């Protein structure tokens, strides 16, 4: 038997169609900005105009890879062809942003490591990105910024859960008996 309290919680947990529509429309606008990589492109233009956005992606992926960062691991993480990954890495090595080290597990395999210059560039680019975000948030009350940061993380985490479920080749909206 459901209680009135349970019914109120269900109603409170269900977003209104208007709110869902507004969020969807805002996501469409954000997707265009993300698709154009406006934040990354702005940071690169200020710090190292000769780099491509893909170079920035390589640096970011190397920082996130668990285990050995190889060309194959980078290509897989970026979902690009290994030959494209190899060209990007070769360019970054030639620029002194990455270096190749021998794997301790398999001396035939090259590991990729950010050089001091690479770490410095990544830190500067991250600083510019954060500065851009701070500029957008300028004038917002602290409590709204805090609420937004917590809720935005929760929102994105919800999409990650759906994505991981879809990766397991099942309908992400389907629930199992264990859930």
Image (cartoon, rainbow, N blue to C red):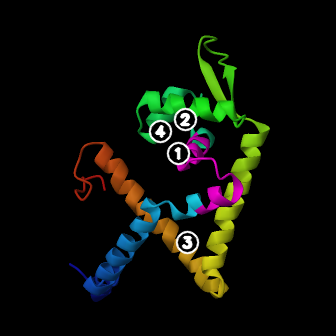
Q: Earlier in the sequence, mark 1 or mark 4?
A: 1
**Residue 14 in sight in this render:** no
Please, what secondary structure does the residue beneath circle 1 have?
Answer: helix
In this picture, is 5 found above or below 57? Answer: below
Please tell me how crowded label 4 is: few (under 14), some (14-19), or many (20+) other residues with Cα within 10 Å. Answer: some
Within the magenta stretch, is there residue 101?
Answer: no
- Residue wearing tag 4: 77
Quadrant where the N terminus lies? bottom left
Rendered location of residue 69, percent (x, y): 59, 30
Q: Earlier in the sequence, mark 2 or mark 1?
A: 1
CB contact under 8 Å: marks 2 and 1: yes
Which residues, given as a range, are shown in magenta? 42-61
Spatial CA distance of label 1 from label 3 is 29 Å
Spatial CA distance of label 2 from label 1 is 7 Å
Please tell me how crowded label 2 is: few (under 14), some (14-19), or many (20+) other residues with Cα within 10 Å. Answer: many
- Residue wearing tag 3: 150
């Amino acid at each position: 038997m459901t209680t009135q309290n349970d019914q109120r919680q269900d109603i409170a947990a269900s977003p209104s169609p208007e709110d869902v529509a507004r969020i969807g429309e805002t996501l469409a606008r954000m997707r265009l900005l993300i698709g154009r990589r406006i934040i990354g492109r702005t940071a690169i233009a200020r710090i190292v105009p000769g780099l491509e956005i893909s170079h920035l992606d390589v640096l970011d992926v190397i920082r996130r890879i668990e285990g050995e960062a190889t060309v194959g691991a980078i290509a897989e993480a970026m979902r690009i062809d290994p030959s494209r990954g190899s060209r990007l890495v070769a360019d970054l090595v030639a620029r002194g942003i990455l270096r190749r080290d021998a794997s301790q597990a398999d001396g035939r395999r090259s590991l990729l490591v950010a050089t001091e210059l690479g770490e410095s560039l990544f830190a500067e680019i991250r600083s510019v990105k954060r500065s851009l975000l701070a500029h957008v948030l300028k004038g917002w009350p602290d409590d709204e910024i805090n609420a937004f940061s917590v809720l935005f993380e929760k929102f994105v985490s919800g999409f990650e859960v759906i994505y991981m479920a879809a990766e397991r080749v099942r309908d992400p909206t389907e629930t199992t008996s264990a859930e």
